[in-house]
Image (cartoon, rainbow, N blue to C red):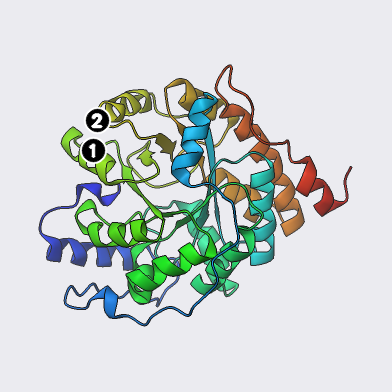
Amino acid sequence: PSFIDNAPPDRARFNTEMAAIAFAASPVVGTKLATRNPRVSRRTRAAPTTRAAASTTTKSISQTFVDLKKRNQCAFVPFICAGDPNLDATEKAVRILDDAGADIIELGVPYSDPLADGPTIQASATRALASGTTLQQVIDLVARLTPTVKAPIVLFTYYNPIYQRGFERFVSEIAAAGAKGLLVPDIPLEETKELSKICTKNGIDLVLLSTPTTPIDRMAKIADASNGFIYLVSVTGVTGARSGVESRVEELVKKLKTVTDKPVCVGFGISEEAQARQVVQWGADGVIVGSALVKALGESGSPEKGLEALQKLAVELRRGSNRDGAKEVGASGGGFFANLFGKK
């Protein structure tokens, strides 16, 4: 299945179908989804516990792209799932990615029914949930990271955890923790208005997605409503490393850029330096890599080996994301990584 940016107008039928798909795809049997009830206001949910804002000088996503454009540089946007193999390793991994030159970091909240994700990220989320990782722990992790991590953090989560917590509470808490963006793959364009308004009020960029099957008129609406950048899904399907990037991505990038001047970042299926370089040559403003990094971190035998594999791949992907003639951004991983493993 593809993303639901092309959601049908019959919302009741759509929600029923999505719930059925979610249960069928669930890697964690018995997890119950909340139904969406339009009569229940998200604004009536419990107010968040007061929390001091993170003392960070991290730039916004928009400012990050302004600075990248000045250097004629393309963004490297890595994704990992929080809690896999454990939260301590996740904290170290985010710092390694930052040290390797990530411009923006997507941090996934593990969820039992990740409809947009393929086997690698599904397995990662399952491991994280099995280890006891919760949404609150992920938010607390962001709060620990943002005072010292340069790259802005975008939380990637499905709709259900946000709905359960309440829009106001969820957004205000991630903003207080220092997150700069939010990506919700299973919320259609027509249902983003309230969430987008609350995000804007709290300084959070709500990033929307466009797919290969998105009609040009809808693509324009998605681009107009998206903040920070537009996430261009490169394939009709779920996440996962692939042997090559489809050539139609070049045309999709050009097509999207005819309706917007906002940054366009390409994700899904990019796993190697050469693939990242190809996407850059096709005119993308950012390269998003998830499954390959998730696999390196979570399937290497131990947290230590996973962090080493992650660092190596991140450096390669950063190199592949560089535009010709642009000044390279970030170190090769020597700083934090060397201190972590006692290397000089």
Q: CA distance from mark 2 to mark 1?
A: 8 Å
On the question of residue 242 being in view, the answer is no
- Residue drawn 42% across and 22% down? 282
Please identify the residue farthest to the bottom as the structure is shown. 46
Q: Secondary structure at mark 1?
A: helix
Q: Secondary structure at mark 2?
A: loop
- Residue drawn 59% across and 17% down? 325
Q: Is residue 185 left or right of residue 150?
A: left
Please identify the residue farthest to the left as the structure is shown. 10
Horizontal and vertical percent position of residue 128: 56, 66
Reply above or below: 220 against 183. above
Quarter of the image for residue 160 reads bottom left
- Residue drawn 56% across and 25% down? 274
Q: Assess whether mark 1 and mark 2 are in contact (beta carbons under 8 angstroms).
A: yes
Quarter of the image for residue 31 reads bottom left
Horizontal and vertical percent position of residue 134: 52, 73
Which residue in the structure is indicated by mark 2? 259
- Residue drawn 45% across and 31% down? 285
Hey, what amino acid is under mark 1? Met
Image disc number at residue 219: 1
Reply above or below: 14 against 271. below
Reply above or below: 30 against 80. below
Hey, what amino acid is under mark 2? Val
Of circles 2 and 1, which is in front? 2
Q: Residues within 10 Å of mark 2 (few under 14, many from 20)?
A: some
Horizontal and vertical percent position of residue 110: 49, 64
Horizontal and vertical percent position of residue 333: 74, 41
